[in-house]
Image (cartoon, rainbow, N blue to C red):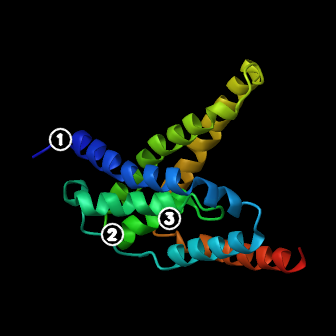
Amino acid sequence: ARRPGVLLATWVVLASVPTAAIGLLLEDTFEALFGDPASVAFAFLVTATLLWITPREEDGPIDLADVGWARALALGVAQGLAITPGISRSGTTIAVALLMGLRREVAIKLSFLMSVPAILGAVVLKLDEVEPGALDPVGVGLGAVAAAITGYAALAWLVAIVQRGGLRRFSYYLGFASVAALAVAAFA
């Protein structure tokens, strides 16, 4: 049997392939959606639906060793499509993992670790748009510390919610946000 760390790294690398392909091939399409409130409203509705249909009580039977390449690639596709403005990356990857029968703990770990190469890849892609000397090192450092602290707190909160099977409650908020975004789109 392979060690859990090796398995986790394998699934994260496999999931990163479709995420990178989708991000690179459709970057301009996703960026264009930022200015379209109707698209964002629809994306909120997609996330709300995914969260609404996630299993609440039972934990899935699929453990880390049983994820397999097909599930890892499917999670990568889900993460790649979550580049769409209004679709939650973590909400989508956790919901899809739970819908595929992964145990909650495995879904959370995979979702979190899958974000690392995706975020680093996005940063590398956008580095050429940063003018040399335009960034204040102190400001960047303080921002990184603030992001780390709030990110850790938000992650701890999300883990508790997922462990209790409570993702569904976010669907109410997103449903309201979808209606509000549609109203904005109608008057824009």
- The amino acid type of the residue labelled 2 equals Asp
Give me the C-alpha separation between circle 1 and circle 3.
27 Å
Q: Residue 110 placed where, x, y %?
A: 38, 52
Judge the density around disc 3: few (<14), some (14-19), many (≥20) Cα neighbours within 10 Å: many
Nearer to us: label 1 or label 3: 3
Nearer to us: label 3 or label 2: 3
Indicate the quadrant containing the C terminus: top left, top right, bottom left or bottom right: bottom right
Pick whichever of labels 1 and 2 is earlier in the sequence.
Answer: 1
From the image, tell me which residue sits under label 2: 59
Q: Which mark is residue 92?
A: 3
Q: Residue 31 placed where, x, y %?
A: 67, 56
Nearer to us: label 1 or label 2: 1
Dot 2 falls on a residue whose secondary structure is loop
- Up-down relation of residue 146 to residue 20 (above or below): above
- Up-down relation of residue 103 to residue 147 (above or below): below
Pick whichever of labels 3 and 2 is earlier in the sequence.
Answer: 2
Residue placed at 34% from the left, 47% from the top? 12
Give me the C-alpha separation between circle 3 and circle 2.
17 Å
- The amino acid type of the residue labelled 1 equals Arg
Dot 1 falls on a residue whose secondary structure is loop
Lateral position of residue 108 relative to residue 91, left or right: left
Q: Nearer the viewer, residue 2 or 16?
A: 16
Dot 3 falls on a residue whose secondary structure is helix
- Up-down relation of residue 46 to residue 93 (above or below): below
From the image, tell me which residue sits under label 1: 3
Residue 152 visible: yes
